[in-house]
Amino acid sequence: MHKNILNLFNFLKSAAQFIKIVIVFFILLHLLFWIQNLTGNPIGFLKPFIPVLSSFLFIGTSCSKESIDLLGAKFEFSYIIALFAYLVLYLIDHLAYRGLEIAEEVYNSGYRKAREAEENAFNKKLAKDQSAEQRALKRYNIFVSTSIKPKFSHQEQKVNLEEQNKIMNKFLIEKTGVSPISYNGGFLYSFENFSAVDNNLQYFFKLLKSSSPLDYVICIQILGKDLVKEDKQLKELISLKFVNKVSACSDTVYRYRFNTSHRYETSLLGLFQKDGETFEVHEFREMI
C-alpha cells in the first residue's frame, strides 16, 4: 500500500511537470501566433494548435478588445491578457506541484512516525517477552574445585587438600543452606532462585578473598530447557580452569542482566573454540 501511494505521488508530480512543459510550449506558440497576427504572414505549423490558441485569445478578447498602435503595428490587449492567462495557469500548476511535494512530505513523515511507533511497540513487546522468558529461568549451578596454592605445595607445609575441602564445604553449606554433590573433580551447588544469585555469590567471593592455602576454580551456569547443552557448557568452563575467578558463559551473563539489582559487574574473559564452536566466557567481578 505504501509503495502504491508513493507511485501515485510520483505519477501526479510527473503529470504536473508535463503540464508545465505543455504550458511553456503553448506560450511560445502564442507568441508566434501573435507575431503572425502582427505581420499578417501565416505560420504553417501553427494550424493544428489554432483551436487551443484561439480559445485563450477568446479569454483575452472577452476581457478587453482595445489595442494600441506602436511602431506602425497594432498591439491588441487580448493577446497580453491571453499570455497572462497562460502564466496564471502555469502558476496554478506550479502550486499544485508544490502542494503534491508538501503532501508527500507530510505523508512520509506520518508514515515514518507510524512505523516508529509500530517498531517501538514491537520492541517493547519483544523486550517484555524476553524479560518474562529470562526471568522464568530460575535454577542455576555453581561449581567449585580446589587446588593447593604453589607456595603451599611443598611437602613440609603439610596442607591436607581433603581437609581444606571439608572446611570450604562446611562454610558454604552453612551460608547457602545447600549441600553439594561431587562433580567433575569438584563440588556442584544447585540453587533455585537466580534472581537472588548475588546473595549466594558473595560467599564464593569470600573464598577468593580468604587466607586459605587453596586456589579456586568457580563457574556458574544458568539452567533452562536444554540441560544437556548447559551441562556441556559448564564442563567447558571447568576445563578452561580460570583460577580465582567466577566465570560464566554468555547465556548466564545475559540472564543476570534481567535481575532487578546487581551487586556484581561482568566482563569478557575471551572467545574460545571447541569442537568447531565458538563461545564467550565472562567473569563476575565485585564492583569497585
Image (cartoon, rainbow, N blue to C red):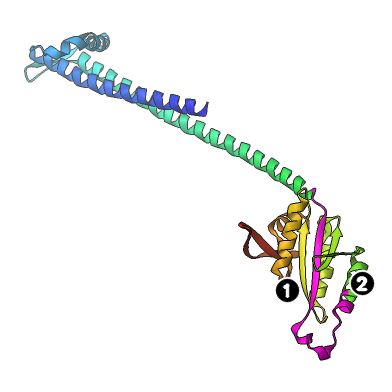
Circle 1 is placed at which residue position? Answer: 243
**Do the CB atoms of the residues marked 2 and 1 lie less than 8 Å apart?**
no
Q: Considering only vertical position in the picture, is 287 above or below 150? A: above
Local packing at callout 1 (Cα closer than 10 Å; few below 14, some 14-19, many 20+) is some
Circle 2 is placed at which residue position? Answer: 170
Residue in the image at 79% along x and 53% along y: 223
Question: Which residue range is magenta in the image?
Answer: 136-165
Of residues 160 and 34, the one drawn nearer to the viewer in this rendering: 160
Q: Does the segment drawn in magenta span residue 68?
A: no
* Residue 251 seen in render: yes
In the figure, is residue 53 to the left or right of 215? Answer: left
The amino acid marked with disc number 1 is Val
Q: Considering only vertical position in the picture, is 183 above or below 92? A: below
Residue in the image at 54% along x and 33% along y: 111
Disc with the residue nearer the chain's start (2 vs 1): 2
Q: Does the segment drawn in magenta span residue 151?
A: yes
